[in-house]
Structure formats: structure tokens, C-alpha cells
Image (cartoon, rainbow, N blue to C red):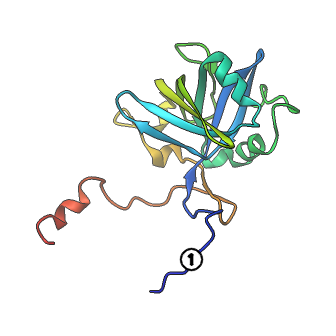
Amino acid sequence: MEKIEVSLEMMCYPMPCMILGTTVGEKANFMTVAWFTQISLKPAYILASLDKSHYSNPGIKETGAFSINVPSTAMAEVTDYCGLVSGKKYDKSTVFEVFYGKEGKAPMIVECPYNLECRLVQTVELAAEELFIGEVVAAYSDERCLTDGVPDMAKVDPLLLNVPQMAYLGVGSHVGRAFKMGKARIGKD
């Protein structure tokens, strides 16, 4: 099969969407972000990449905290809304039912089936973005989304973003066991 070079502007990789929460001034604020990833397991660190112009950035720096809220596919419309409008013009503090975790600084969303409470560890300045690295201090899950005490992504039903098609997706079918399937090939190559 022949490969054809395509534009770098729309890298074709479905990304999980999340709604980042922080306090700006005295209010909870939420924004949709797809550029985030876990970068360390022990300690548990997560990175969120935000354009420097975002309203949430000063709140993260001031409070030293943010949350990662994983919306289900049923929350696609409200997730999209939180990415379309800025807290500079729209009060998003009442869009969700809010709760606070053990540190009490980062607003989290009750309606999201999975939430991470993060303490800001470092901010990395890039040309147009700020990378916020947070230590995950606590994780919260709806009880109905657990299987054997562990969050089950099929039950969480996380929302994914496919940028090239500008489309939201859900998680597909179970393909196989990670770190198990490949063992059948060991010694055959």
C-alpha cells in the first residue's frame, strides 16, 4: 500500500476529551481540552497543554490546582459548549454540579463519570502554549463505572475527539488484553 504525505496541522489520532476545571477569581471555570496525557505513573503526573490566551491559565497558576474531568459520550454537547465559549464572557460555574476533593482547590464535575484532582507541579512555557504538569492527588469514579474496583472505560464511555474529521467519537470494541496478546509472538520472529 502506498503512503501519501498529509498535512501536519490535523494529526490523525483520536484523543480523549476532558473538561479541565480550575478556579478563576472566586468562581469555578471549565474548559474542554483534548491535548492532555499521563506522563508518569509514580508519582502520578498528568500534562495539559493550553494556549496561553485561555482564561483558565491564570487560575491554575494562582490556585496551584486543576482537575481533569472525563465526560461520557452523553455529555458531548455540554463538552463542546465548554470548548466553544470562554470564561471571559460566559459564566460556566453553574453549567455543572461541582464538588471538591480532599485538597479543596480544584472544582470537579459530578456529572463526569471519572475525575482527577491535580496539584500543579510545573508550568512549561512554549511559544504559544503553556504545559501544566499536575500531580494527581486523588481519583474519583462513579461507582457504576467500576469493575472489580477499577474504572472500566466501557462503562465510563469517554468522549474522544477526531480532529481531522472534527468529530466526537466513543470508545470502540474490546480488541484484546494489553501486555498479553503479544506474548504469542515471542520467539516466533
Where is residue 18 drawn, in percent x and y? 61, 41
The residue that mark 1 highlights is 5
- Looking at this view, is 6 or 185 the one in front? 6
The vertical placement of 109 against 165, above or below, is: above
The vertical placement of 146 against 161, above or below, is: above
User: Does any portion of residue 147 appear in the rendered image?
Assistant: yes
The vertical placement of 18 against 143, above or below, is: below
Q: Residue furthest bottom?
A: 1
The vertical placement of 33 against 177, above or below, is: above
Residue drawn at (61%, 65%), measured in percent from left and top? Answer: 8
Disc 1 packing (10 Å; few <14; some 14–19; many ≥20): few
Residue drawn at (23%, 61%), measured in percent from left and top? Answer: 182
Judge left or right: residue 66 versus residue 136.
right
Q: Quadrant of the C terminus?
A: bottom left
- Looking at this view, is 129 or 78 the one in front? 129
Q: Quadrant of residue 49?
A: top right
Residue drawn at (44%, 86%), measured in percent from left and top? Answer: 1
Q: Residue furthest left?
A: 187
- Looking at this view, is 183 or 72 the one in front? 183
Where is residue 43 drawn, in percent x and y? 37, 27
